[in-house]
Amino acid sequence: MYRLLTLLFLTVLPSLPHAQEATPAQDPVRQAHWAMGAYFGTGWYQVDKNRSVFVFRIPPRQTVRQSGIDESGTRNIGVEILYPLTFGLHSMDEVPDFIDFDNFGTVSFTPGVQLEIPVNNKWALRPYIHIGAGYEKDTGEWANIWYGGLKSRYVLGDTSKLRWSLLNSISYAGYKPEYKESGRYGSAMAGLEFNQPLANLQFDGEPVRLNWHVTYSYLFDKLNFYITEDTIASVQDEWELGLAFGKSNNKMKIWFMSFEHIGLSFKTSSNGNYRAISVNLRSPFTH
């Protein structure tokens, strides 16, 4: 069951209604591995209508230096250190399930670094890399986990009424359990991001802006999930619409936590096998 954790993509509630039946004529399929939950992120999902798994990803980060271009044209490369912890739970029906140690099935720690390189005043790049390890309690299996890639944001227009940008990224991830061949996954993303003020709407004394994005991601390798011994559901792409509210100049704050913005993202695959809704706290570029 825990090898299904990679169908998350920061998912809250996906569903797989159109699984396909496996036949001997089909090529052998590779089952998605639990270790990739650290790469795809937080979420809860249901596969066979009576089993659920919750993956909780804690993503603390430390900003070492902000990026930018000063008046003399000197580029300052931004640096962030990330310390993501990912937990896989048997179930999350009640709050006590989260603090019950016996309920935890997987845990991984994949620290990494992100750089932000301002190419010019409109274009910025974000290379990143994470390297860590994970553990599955039921089998006692350890896995080395790594993922990285390059994200791009190019500002197409910027006025007092609308700022919109082109987003692109390419990523690659892999794992290597002990005594087994390594597994690898890759994806490419393209989309648009918009930021616009909302007239006469304020939060904490500051004007509110609507941040939204539309992206399409293509997976180089299908993610396959065994619903039963004879039934497989596969996912190879994802459409995403994100909507969020943020401040004009500062981050949103709730208690001791701060976010770029707060909202939701709605996701689906082209074949209808995957649908999801997730919490939207950062731009796809800075996520």
Image (cartoon, rainbow, N blue to C red):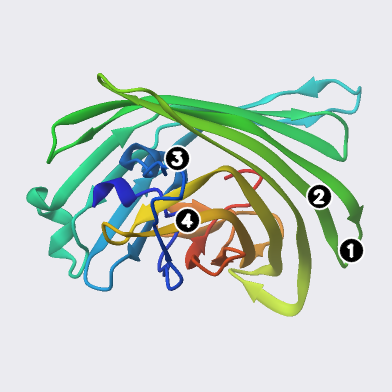
To which residue does mark 1 refer?
160
Q: Secondary structure beneath disc 4?
A: strand
Residue 234, which numbered label? 4
Q: Mark 1: which secondary structure?
A: loop
Residue 97 locus on image (x, y percent):
14, 61
> Residue shown at 51%/55% (left/top)?
235
Q: Position of residue 81 (x, y in %)?
A: 50, 28
The residue that label 3 is drawn on is 39
- Whole-angstrom CA distance, mark 4 to mark 3, is 18 Å
For the C terminus, which image quadrant?
A: top right
Q: Residues within 10 Å of mark 1 (few under 14, many from 20)?
A: few
Residue at 25% across, 19% down: 179
Front tag of 4 and 1: 4
The residue mark sitting in front, 1 or 2, is 2
Please state which amino acid type lies under the numbered disc 4.
Ser
Q: Is residue 65 visible?
A: no
Q: Give the total of numbered labels.
A: 4
Q: Nearer the viewer, mark 4 or mark 2?
A: 4
Q: Amino acid at mark 2?
A: Leu
Instruction: Pick whichever of labels 1 and 3 is earlier in the sequence.
Output: 3
Q: Of marks 1 and 2, which one's residue comes earlier in the chain?
A: 1
On the rendered structure, is 33 left or right of 205? left
